[in-house]
Image: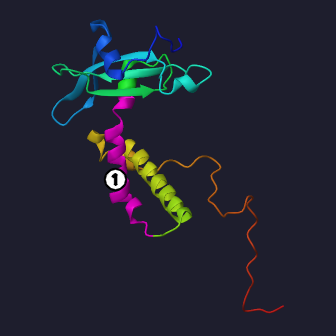
Amino acid sequence: MRRNPQHKPVSAKELAQALPESAWHNVTWREGTHAPLASRFAAVRVRPAHRDYWRSAPRPEEWFLVEWPQGESEPTKYWLSTLPWDTTLADLVDQAKLRWRIERDYQELKQEIGLGHYEGRGWRGFHHHATLAIAAYGFLVSERSLIPPSDRCSPSLLEAPRLSEGYRPRGTPATTRAPRPQLDRHHSH
């Protein structure tokens, strides 16, 4: 649809309040400290109208996600998402609520890995420092995920992996050679 006198854009709040009761669903997105975190959400496909009168074609459809907790007089949060049209409501909520994980990761990067320790002045140096810190953090998260919380001391998880057949340590020659003859130091030729 295009903007015209019969079809004007509406605000996020107006659209959310006009949604039928059947559009709202309770979604739990993660375990909290004391209880699961859950709220009431609705999602519909929209075309954002911001400055669309300057465009030759309408904007593509996006998801409009709204959080309206039970007991609140109006919606509390809104998101636009370019996730595919077949994304489930639970997946939309998971993506919208990732902020706490991102903030936690950033705090760990600064405190545990040293992202905040850079004291140089150049962009290139900071870029290298940040890249190494992020790679180290990714490695640690990957390693941490291999050890289930209840089995942290399981011996099988701490064993070195078997070497594959034909393994050759770095720096060794590609083919094995015959041993060198030893010179007899007591006799000269």
Residue 63, above or below 112 = above
Residue 59, position as x, y percentages in the image: 55, 22
Does the segment drawn in magenta span residue 162? no
Viewer-proximal residue among 152 and 22:
22
Q: Check the image and report above or below for 131 versus 143.
A: below
Q: Is residue 147 visible?
A: no
Between 35 and 156, the one lying in front of the other is: 35
Foreground pick, 12 / 145:
12
- Report the magenta residues as a range: 94-119
Q: Main secondary structure of the magenta part?
A: helix
Element at badge 1?
helix
**Going by the image, does 164 lie left or right of 70?**
right
Report crowding for label 1: few under 14, some 14 to 19, many 20 or more residues within 10 A (C-alpha): some
Q: Is residue 109 magenta?
A: yes
- Residue 22 at x, y = what percent? 30, 6
- Whether residue 121 sits left or right of residue 164 in the image: it is left
Outermost residue, right side: 189
Give the residue at x 74% y 86%: 184
Which residue matches tag 1? 108
1 on left or right of 186: left
For badge 1, the amino acid type reads Glu
